């Protein structure tokens, strides 16, 4: 089937709106879906540049890891794209029906397409990796990004007693209390002042959701551990993103002198089956208005232009065929 799609032919160039030969479904679990909306997530950008850890280097490819679409029988669903088929940024896509969730009522399809991916990281992290206990406290490191803003809301919805948001963008940081943050910390170039602010606001948290990694994560770990009243009390660190860099230099004393437990959340750390099992409850949260998201809608045909534009802080772009 020939469809219009965002096509990546080089990892050094944005996708172009071109014709693409969509493969036929390979078995009874697959079907062709009419794509209604697909989110332009950071994960999509990294895959289209060949930089994501799941990338296999094969070209051409159609980017897009999820979306909202309509099946042949008229059912509107949220779907997660399979790694073995072209992505969701096309007029039509091949989907695994086991990775779809019907959308109840009359939901805002663009909002669902925008919110599911950034919300899913913290939702799965706090339900599957380190199940959040009612009343526990959470620090979101990198809270001024889309996923970080979602994590503030998710932590509250899942019963966190106190949530601290830390990030660099002062304008977005000022909006976090409206999303549920009980305290905020500005990450600045003044290392000592930042460490002191983190220690004061978040030394006693139970869980850290980390979208930054690299030097900011290492500095935050040491600031929290040095100020913690009881270092033997568990501090669960969930590594999700690496906006600040892919590697970390961490003193060994951080692991020997405190009960610091570091683990990741992503493809491989959690099974596809576990991710899919969490989709219905997250769809319900988003559809009911439980999670706020700012969206801008752009036509798929303008993907090359849209790809090169700077993202507005806190706003997720959704492409619509």
Image (cartoon, helix red, strand yellow):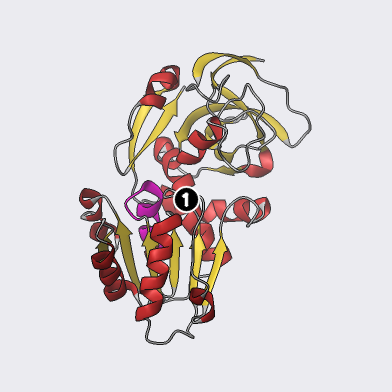
In the image, residue 104 sits, relative to residue 166, either above or below, namely: above
Which residues lie in the magenta part?
143-155
SS for dot 1: loop
Q: Is residue 230 left or right of residue 197?
A: right
For label 1, the crowd category at 10 Å Cα-Cα, with few meaning under 14, some 14 to 19 and many 20 or more, is some
**Most frequent secondary structure within the magenta stretch:** helix
Q: Position of residue 133 (x, y in %)?
A: 48, 75
Quadrant of residue 217 in the image?
Answer: bottom left
Instruction: Report the front residue among 73 and 163.
Output: 163
Is residue 145 something one can see in this rendering? yes
Q: Position of residue 26 (x, y in %)?
A: 77, 29
Quadrant of residue 197 in the image?
Answer: bottom left
In reply to whether residue 144 is colored magenta, the answer given is yes
Instruction: Report the front residue among 70 and 140.
Output: 140
Which residue: 27% across, 75% down? 200
Q: Quadrant of the N terminus?
A: top right
């Amino acid at each position: 089937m020939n469809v219009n799609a965002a096509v990546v032919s080089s990892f050094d160039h944005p996708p172009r709106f071109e014709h693409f030969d969509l493969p036929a479904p390979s078995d009874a679990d697959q079907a062709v879906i009419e794509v209604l909306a697909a989110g332009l997530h950071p994960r999509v950008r990294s895959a289209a540049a060949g930089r994501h850890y799941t990338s296999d280097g094969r070209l051409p490819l159609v980017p897009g890891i999820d979306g909202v679409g309509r099946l042949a029988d008229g059912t509107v669903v949220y779907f997660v794209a399979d790694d073995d088929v072209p992505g969701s940024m096309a007029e039509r896509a091949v989907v695994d029906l086991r990775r779809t969730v019907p959308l109840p009522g009359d939901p805002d399809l663009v909002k669902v397409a925008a919110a599911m991916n950034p919300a899913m990281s913290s939702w799965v992290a706090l339900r599957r990796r380190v199940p959040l206990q009612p009343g526990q406290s959470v620090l979101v490191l990198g809270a001024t990004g889309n996923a970080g803003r979602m994590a503030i809301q998710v932590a509250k919805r899942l019963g966190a007693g106190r949530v601290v948001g830390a990030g660099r963008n002062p304008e977005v940081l000022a909006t976090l209390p409206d999303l549920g943050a009980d305290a905020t910390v500005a990450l600045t170039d003044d290392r000592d002042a930042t460490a002191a602010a983190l220690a004061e606001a978040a030394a006693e948290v139970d869980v850290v959701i980390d979208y930054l990694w690299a030097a900011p994560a290492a500095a935050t770990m040491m600031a929290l551990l040095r100020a913690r009243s009881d270092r033997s009390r568990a501090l669960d660190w969930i590594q999700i993103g690496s906006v600040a860099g892919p590697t970390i230099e961490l003193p060994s004393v951080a692991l020997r002198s405190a009960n610091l437990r570091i683990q990741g959340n992503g493809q491989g750390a959690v099974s596809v089956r576990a991710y899919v099992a969490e989709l219905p409850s997250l769809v319900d949260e988003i559809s009911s208005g439980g999670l706020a998201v700012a969206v801008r809608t752009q036509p798929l045909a303008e993907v090359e232009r849209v790809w090169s534009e700077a993202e507005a802080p806190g706003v997720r772009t959704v492409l619509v065929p």
